[in-house]
Image (cartoon, grey):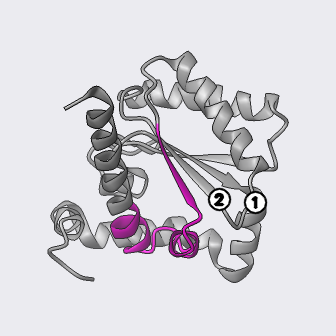
Amino acid sequence: MTDSTRDDHDVARITGEVRHWLTRAVIGLNLCPFAKSVHVKGQVRYVVSDATRDEDLLDELERELTLLVESDPEAIDTTLLIVPHALSDFLAYNDFLYVADQLLQSLRLDGTLQIASFHPQYQFEGAGPDDIENYTNRAPYPIFHLLREDSIARAAEVFPEAEDIYERNMETLRRLGHAGWLEWMAGKSDL
């Protein structure tokens, strides 16, 4: 097997794991009521980063932000930049988010795009590391979700209770618990 074949296989596997998480957790549990539409329309761009260094990841993030803002929203409405080879430590990831937001501002895209964050060890401030509520933002890999502000505004018009999503998600995960989460993600249970 050549390196490029192995890389293609790894990219397909990683993308598949993220698609499973998106369809089963984010859409399946309705953690984000806006996600289903762009997923069904094929408007989600999945990018698996090869970056192992922050500098390389920042360059890739800049390319993806630029590509997203220059793309037709009907073709690419949102991007998931998946980072399997860097930022495995949540605190380092959180620190990088500050740099990512600085990049967004330096590109003058603040107010046009935003970056949402997902990480396998995601932990809300004030939450314990094992609190089930953290799973609303836990993903198989560190992910930078690049979103269009216009799309968020349009979605919020369709879902007028958007401000209640956070609390509803916390309640959903409390009802599931850790064992229920594992069963749900394995496809062994329904709500």
Q: Number of labelled discs?
A: 2
Which residue, given by chain and number where applicable, does mark 2 sit on?
76
The stretch of residues the image draws in magenta is 22-48
Image-based side of 105 in relation to 130, left or right? right
Residue at far right of view: 108
Q: What crowding class fits label 2: few (fewer than 14 Cα within 10 Å), some (14-19), or many (20 or more)?
A: some
* Residue 29 falls inside the magenta stretch: yes
Q: What crowding class fits label 1: few (fewer than 14 Cα within 10 Å), some (14-19), or many (20 or more)?
A: few
Residue 129 appearing in the image: no
Tell me which amino acid carries mark 1: Asp
Tell me which amino acid carries mark 2: Ile
Under circle 1, the secondary element is: loop
Tell me the number on the disc at residue 72.
1
Residue 190 appearing in the image: yes
Image-based side of 119 in relation to 155, left or right? left
Q: To which quarter of the image does residue 110 belong?
A: top right
Residue 18, percent from left and from top: 37, 53
Residue 68, percent from left and from top: 70, 48
Residue 154 or residue 64, whichever sits in front? 64
Residue at the image point whose x is 72% and y is 28% from the top: 102
* Residue 151 falls inside the magenta stretch: no
Give above or below for 187 relative to 92: below
Under circle 2, the secondary element is: loop
Residue at the image point whose x is 40% and y is 31% from the top: 90
Residue 137 or residue 68, whichever sits in front? 68
Residue 125, percent from left and from top: 47, 41
Residue 32 or residue 174, whichever sits in front? 32
Residue at the image point whose x is 72% and y is 29% from the top: 103
- Are discs 1 and 2 less than 8 Å apart at CB? yes
**How far is mark 1 from mark 2, CA to CA?**
6 Å
Tell me the number on the disc at residue 140.
none
Residue at the image point whose x is 54% and y is 20% from the top: 56
